[in-house]
C-alpha cells in the first residue's frame, strides 16, 4: 500500500481535506476516453463540436495512467454508452442528439453512435483498461447515474477520488458534483480534462475556486505524478 500526505500544490486547498491518503482508500476515475469523443469521426464531432480541446488531454492522461499503475490504486474507466436496442435512451437525450444530426444509434464512420460493442463506443488507443481495472458503462452524464459505481467504491472503502477525462463541463463535472454530494473528496487533474471549447472548460475550473473548493480541488497531472514519486 502506497501512503501519501496532502498535495500542497492543489487549488484551492491541499487535497485531501483529511490530510493524508493512500492507495487503499483512493480511486482514479477516467471518464469517457472513447473514440466517440476523441476521434474526429466519432459522436462528439457528429454533433458539430470541435474535438481539439478534448484531444489535448490524450498525452497527459496517458502519462498519468502510466504513473498510477505503478501503485495499487483502484482504477475505473467509464464509457457513455447505450444498449444496442436503445431501450436505455431517455426521450430527452434522444431528441436532443437527433436534433443535432447525431441520433444515438445512428450509423457513423465508427459504427452506431454511442452504442456498446461498436468501434466508436470503445476506448481510444492508450486507454484500454488493464487487467483488474474496472469498466463502468453509463447511459447518462454522471458516472453515478444508473451504474454500480457507488456500490463498488463503498465496498472497496474508497474515500478519495482522482478524476480526469472528457468532457469537463458535462460528464466530468456531473460526476464530480455527485461524488462530492456522496462525501468523496475529489481531485480534478486540469490538464487531463477537455471540453468543446476552452471557455467551457475554464468555467468548471473557476467554479472549483469558490466556497473553499465547492466540489473539490484541482491540480496539474505532472504535480500529481511527481508527488507519487516521493
Image (cartoon, helix red, strand yellow):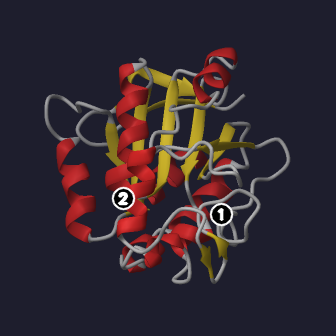
Q: In this rendering, which labeled residue sits more in front, label 1 or label 2? A: 2
User: Within the image, what quadrant is residue 123 found in?
Assistant: bottom right
Q: Quadrant of the C terminus?
A: top right
In space, the residues marked 1 and 2 are separated at their CA atoms by 19 Å
Residue 170 percent location from the top left of the image: 36, 51
In this view of the protein, which residue sits in the foreground, 75 or 14?
A: 75
Which residue is found at the position 28% from the left and 60% from the top? 201
Taking 1 as reference, is 165 above or below it?
A: below
Secondary structure beneath dot 2 equals helix
Q: Disc 1 designates what residue? A: 121
Q: Is residue 9 visible?
A: no
Taking 179 as reference, is 156 above or below it?
A: above
Which residue is found at the position 53% from the left and 47% from the top? 89
Comes first in the chain, label 1 or label 2: 2
Residue 101 percent location from the top left of the image: 42, 75
In this view of the protein, which residue sits in the foreground, 175 or 56?
A: 175
Q: Disc 2 designates what residue? A: 96
User: Within the image, what quadrant is residue 97 found in?
Assistant: bottom left
Taking 190 as reference, is 20 above or below it?
A: above
Amino acid at each position: 500500500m502506497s501512503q501519501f500526505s496532502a498535495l500542497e500544490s492543489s487549488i484551492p486547498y491541499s487535497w485531501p481535506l483529511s490530510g493524508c491518503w493512500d492507495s487503499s482508500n483512493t480511486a482514479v476515475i477516467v471518464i469517457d476516453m472513447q473514440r466517440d469523443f476523441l476521434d474526429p469521426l466519432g459522436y462528439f464531432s457528429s454533433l458539430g463540436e470541435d474535438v481539439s480541446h478534448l484531444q489535448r488531454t490524450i498525452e497527459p492522461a496517458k502519462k498519468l495512467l502510466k504513473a498510477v499503475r505503478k501503485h495499487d490504486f483502484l482504477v475505473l474507466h467509464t464509457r457513455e454508452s447505450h444498449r444496442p436496442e436503445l431501450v436505455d435512451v431517455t426521450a430527452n437525450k434522444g431528441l436532443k442528439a437527433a436534433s443535432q444530426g447525431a441520433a444515438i444509434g445512428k450509423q457513423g464512420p465508427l459504427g452506431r453512435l454511442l452504442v456498446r460493442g461498436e468501434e466508436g463506443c470503445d476506448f481510444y488507443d492508450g486507454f484500454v483498461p488493464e487487467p483488474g481495472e474496472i469498466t463502468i458503462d453509463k447511459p447518462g452524464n454522471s458516472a453515478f447515474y444508473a451504474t454500480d459505481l457507488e456500490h463498488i467504491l463503498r465496498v472497496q472503502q474508497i474515500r478519495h477520488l482522482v478524476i480526469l477525462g472528457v468532457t469537463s463541463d458535462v460528464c466530468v463535472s456531473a460526476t464530480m458534483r455527485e461524488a462530492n454530494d456522496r462525501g468523496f473528496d475529489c481531485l480534478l487533474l486540469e490538464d487531463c480534462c477537455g471540453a468543446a471549447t476552452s471557455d467551457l472548460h475554464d468555467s468548471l475550473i473557476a467554479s472549483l475556486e469558490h466556497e473553499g473548493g465547492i466540489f473539490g480541488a484541482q491540480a496539474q497531472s505532472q504535480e500529481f505524478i511527481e508527488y507519487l514519486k516521493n
